[in-house]
Image: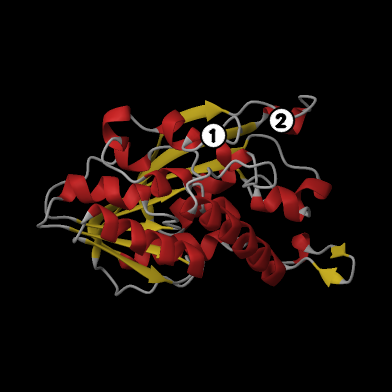
Amino acid sequence: MAELLRVFGREEFDAGSVEQAVRDRYTQVAERGAAASGCCAEDVGSACCGDGGSEMATVADSLYESDDLAALTPEAMAASAGCGNPIGLSEAKSGETVLDLGSGGGIDCFLAAQEVDEDGQVIGIDMTHAMIDLARQNAEKLGVHNVVFKLGKIEAIPQLDASVDLVISNCVIALSPDKDRVFDEIYRVLKPGGRFVVSDMVVTDELPDDVRSSAEEWVSCVGGADLLSRYLGRMERSGFVDVEIMSDVPMRPRSDGTAWEESVRSVTVRGWKA
């Protein structure tokens, strides 16, 4: 995408290098999760990590109910890099098939597995090998048998058409340079009458060019944060109906409180496939 072009040394920062930067960063997150040392260490993106800090499960503690976390592994909590609680707002039902885009260490998948019971299934998709390995290890430790994890990209979901009741995602679509393709793919895999519930970073003012072209800002879920109105418009363009904002939380300014930083928000949005 032309608006992403920038030179970092000799590397052109285009859609491909966005993907590589994201993969590299979240490999670090997975490694910290495997060591149960927390995802918010100083060299891991801060925007996806709530208020920051290096203590284990800082992000998870801020987003989920303590009762929900009680049965999870420290590794799953430590690898959490979300900005919301989509499964908590999704009203997942017993027997449903749930797909989590950008499933990371598996925290949202394991919470969804409790909601859909053994009659249901949860599928986690992540493009980072280390995250898939960590999630599978966590599933084995937890003894969860109705969750599977697949390596794949959210722009090309490895899932059959019309095979999913519910799609969730937690602070991941902001990382994609092709959000229209992501929502088209969500629409494709959902059954008629299915819905998505996604938490993500958005902005209410356009980001400056230097922020949108910064690798650090992209991997922190800010450089790729869409203008809220455009984000909702993408969903409707893909064919979704009854799109609604379920939660809208301002994120704390990370430095001097410039206008663009004050416009950064975490939203959870739901929409339906007719």
For the C terminus, the image quarter is bottom left
Is the residue marked by circle 1 packed among few (<14), some (14-19), or many (20+) residues within 10 Å? some
User: Which residue sits furthest front?
Assistant: 35
Q: Which residue is mark 2?
A: 254
Q: Is residue 137 visible?
A: yes
- Sequence-wise, which precedes: disc 1 or disc 2? 1
Task: Out of 69 and 251, give the one closest to the viewer.
Answer: 69
Q: Is residue 148 above or below residue 47?
A: below
- Residue 186 appears at what percent x and percent y? 39, 61
Q: Is residue 88 above or below residue 180?
A: above
Q: Is residue 35 above or below residue 188?
A: above
Name the residue at 47% across, 62% down.
Answer: 131
- Residue 82 appears at what percent x and percent y? 49, 43
Assign a secondary structure to mark 1. loop
Side of 183 relative to 204 (left or right): left
Question: Nearer the viewer's eye, disc 1 or disc 2?
Answer: 1
Badge 2 amino acid: Arg
Disc ID at residue 206: none
Name the residue at 53% across, 42% down.
Answer: 38
- Residue 267 appears at what percent x and percent y? 49, 36
Q: Is residue 32 above or below residue 121?
A: above
Q: Which residue is mark 1?
A: 55
Side of 112 relative to 220 (left or right): left
Badge 1 amino acid: Glu
Is the residue marked by circle 2 packed among few (<14), some (14-19), or many (20+) residues within 10 Å? few
